């Protein structure tokens, strides 16, 4: 029920094809935070699941590249925005809205986990 109320587009658990609307993003593995910021900020509706492509890779996102995206993005957030378990005060990251984007990414992960775990 939770997913029916708050989720739009293609189902998060892909079992019957790739039909349904997604929010496509293209990410550079070598410049994660910059491309995540460029791709996430213009998204109008993050209730659609992300469809992730990486520069130079020719794959269809059936969920694996989305999981890989979240894994490497969380690592980049931890390395760039945190030090010794504390949020840093990096002026470049503040200017580039990277803390805001990190919140969106972490919130999206929590949303996916909630949709997959909450029983009716």
Image: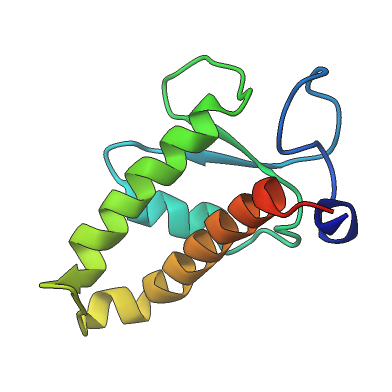
In this view, the residue in front, 86 or 65, is: 86
Q: Position of residue 93 (x, y in %)?
A: 30, 74
Which residue is rendered at x = 46% and y = 60% of the image?
37
Work out whether residue 53 can be spotted: no
Give me the residue at 85% from left, 26% from top.
Answer: 19
Horizontal side of 29 relative to 14 (left or right) equals: left
Q: As drawn, which residue projects farthest toward the left?
A: 84
Q: Quadrant of the C terminus?
A: bottom right
Residue farthest to the front, as pictured: 119
| Colour setup of the view | rainbow
Residue at the spot x=56%, y=60% of the render? 110
x then y, percent, for residue 34: 36, 55
Query: Vertically, is 10 above or below 78?
Result: above
Asked which quadrant contains residue 17, the reply is top right
Quarter of the figure that contains the N terminus: bottom right
Q: Residue furthest top?
A: 58
In the image, is residue 107 above or below residue 116? Answer: below
Q: In front here: 56 or 71?
A: 71
Residue 88 lies in quadrant: bottom left
Tag count? 0
In percent of width and height, residue 65 lies at: 50, 29
Residue placed at 41% from the left, 21% from the top? 56
Instruction: Report x, y in % for residue 67.
Output: 49, 36
Residue 93 visible in the picture: yes
Relative placement, left or right, of 40 versus 99 is right
């Amino acid at each position: 029920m939770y997913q029916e109320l708050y989720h739009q587009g293609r189902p998060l658990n892909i079992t019957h094809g790739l039909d349904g609307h997604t929010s496509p993003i293209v990410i550079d593995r070598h410049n994660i935070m910059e491309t995540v910021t460029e791709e996430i900020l213009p998204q109008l509706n993050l209730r659609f699941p992300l469809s992730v492509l990486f520069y130079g890779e020719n794959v269809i996102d059936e969920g694996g590249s989305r999981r890989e995206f979240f894994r490497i993005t969380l690592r980049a957030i931890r390395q760039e925005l945190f030090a010794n378990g504390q949020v840093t005060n990096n002026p470049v990251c503040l200017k580039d809205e990277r803390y805001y984007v990190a919140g969106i990414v972490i919130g999206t992960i929590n949303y996916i986990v909630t949709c997959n775990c909450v029983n009716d």
